[in-house]
Image: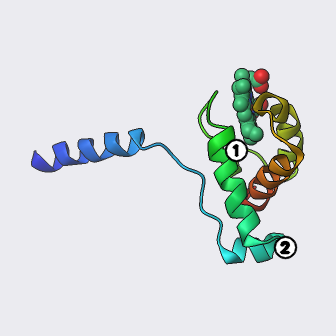
Amino acid sequence: MRRVVLGLLFASAAACTPRTPPMATASDASRANVELAQLQEGRKLLLGKCAGCHKTPMPDEHSAAEWPKMIDEMADRSKLDLAQRSLIEKYLVAMSTK
Ligand code: HEC
């Protein structure tokens, strides 16, 4: 009985944990051929600029090929300047595994 209760608690805690976008690593940066610092900055901007209206978008929600046009649509809404836009795009494109 105890086990069942613990299992349920664990399952509901997992369901409530907000998912955060993955941290970029040095190997992500070299795979995408960009600076690690750019991916880290892009992730920070994503958390700061893209999480106000809906939950933070996850890189895997779209393929690397789809992200640029999604960001086109969202850049106006988020009032991004070109540098911010480019960093967010680099992060999402590099981190999407689709
Ligand atoms: C001012 C509010 C606002 C901000 C800021 C915003 N979004 Fe959105 N976003 C929306 C709304 C509303 C929708 C859903 C309907 C739509 O597509 O118009 C949406 C939908 C999306 C979708 C899903 C579209 C689909 O068809 O699957 C993605 C992905 C997305 N946003 C990414 C982003 C990213 C990346 C950023 C930051 C650069 C961002 N959003 C910032 C309002 C916002």
Instruction: Identify which amino acid the numbered label 2 is placed on.
Output: Asn
The quadrant where ligand 1 appears is top right
**Which type of secondary structure does the marked residue at label 2 adopt?**
loop
Q: Which residue is the extreme one toward the left?
A: 1
Residue visible at 88% across and 51% down in the picture:
65
The vertical placement of 24 against 17, above or below, is below
Residue visible at 24% across and 47% down in the picture:
7
**Which type of secondary structure does the marked residue at label 1 adopt?**
helix
Does any atom of ligand 1 lie closer than 8 Å to the CB of label 1? yes
State the image coordinates of residue 46 (x, y, percent, origin top left): 68, 46
Closer to the chain start, of discs 1 and 2, is 2
**Location of the C terminus (image quadrant):** bottom right
Callout 2 environment at 10 Å: few (<14), some (14 to 19), or many (20+)? few
Residue visible at 83% across and 40% down in the picture:
71
* Callout 1–callout 2 Cβ contact below 8 Å: no
Residue pointed to by mark 1 = 61
State the image coordinates of residue 81 (x, y, percent, origin top left): 85, 42
Q: Nearer the viewer, residue 46 or 69?
A: 46
The reply, left or right, for residue 10 in relation to residue 95 is left
Marks 1 and 2, how far apart at CA: 22 Å
The reply, left or right, for residue 33 in relation to residue 53 is right
Question: Which of label 1 and label 2 is nearer to you?
Answer: 2
Question: Residue 33 — which label?
Answer: 2
Question: Residue 35 — which label?
Answer: none
State the image coordinates of residue 56 (x, y, percent, origin top left): 61, 40
State the image coordinates of residue 41 (x, y, percent, origin top left): 70, 58
The color scheme shown is rainbow
The vertical placement of 35 against 90, above or below, is below
Instruction: Identify which amino acid the numbered label 1 is placed on.
Output: Glu
